[in-house]
Image (cartoon, rainbow, N blue to C red):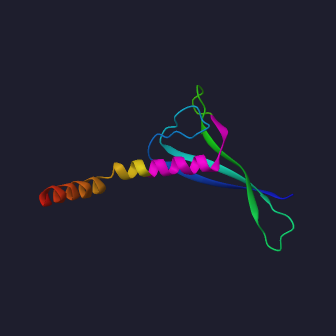
Amino acid sequence: MTIRSRRETITFRHPVHIRGIARELPAGAYEVVTDEEMIEGLSFASWRRIATMINVPSEGVQGATEMLSIGSVDLADAQASDAQAADLHSPDLQSADLKSAKASVAHD
């Protein structure tokens, strides 16, 4: 069985909760490692995700990190939540919402 690991850095712009991790993680960049195994017997290369882990600051030991296992869906949910929070705090969006609200009141 062939296994490969993919590494990527993701960035959260706001503090975030990821299901499966008991504490809130601060905003910042995190390394995510995804392990995949090759699906044998196919006429083309295909991979199945078998593990997703995130490297986070360790509690209580400054400068230390720990790698925690998380669900890929939970990570995607946290990224979507962070992006939504970023949209809500965007000055351009707030300005557009304010203009839209004013236009709505003017038509009533």
Residue 60: give x, y in percent of width and height.
Answer: 58, 25
Quadrant in which residue 36 is drawn: bottom right
Q: Please identify the residue farthest to the top as the structure is shown.
A: 60
- Say which of 104 and 79 sits in front: 104
Drawn side of residue 95 relative to residue 43, left or right:
left
Please tell me whether residue 17 belongs to the stretch shown in magenta.
no
Q: Which residues are magenta?
A: 65-83
Q: Residue at x 65, y 46 (%)?
A: 71
- Say which of 101 and 38 sits in front: 101
- Say which of 102 and 21 sits in front: 102
Residue 10: give x, y in percent of width and height.
Answer: 55, 51
Q: Main secondary structure of the magenta part?
A: helix
Identify the image quadrant of the N terminus: bottom right
Q: Residue at x 58, y 52 (%)?
A: 9
Q: Please identify the residue farthest to the front as the structure is shown.
A: 108
- Say which of 75 and 106 sits in front: 106
Q: Residue at x 63, y 42 (%)?
A: 55
Q: Residue at x 42, y 51 (%)?
A: 84
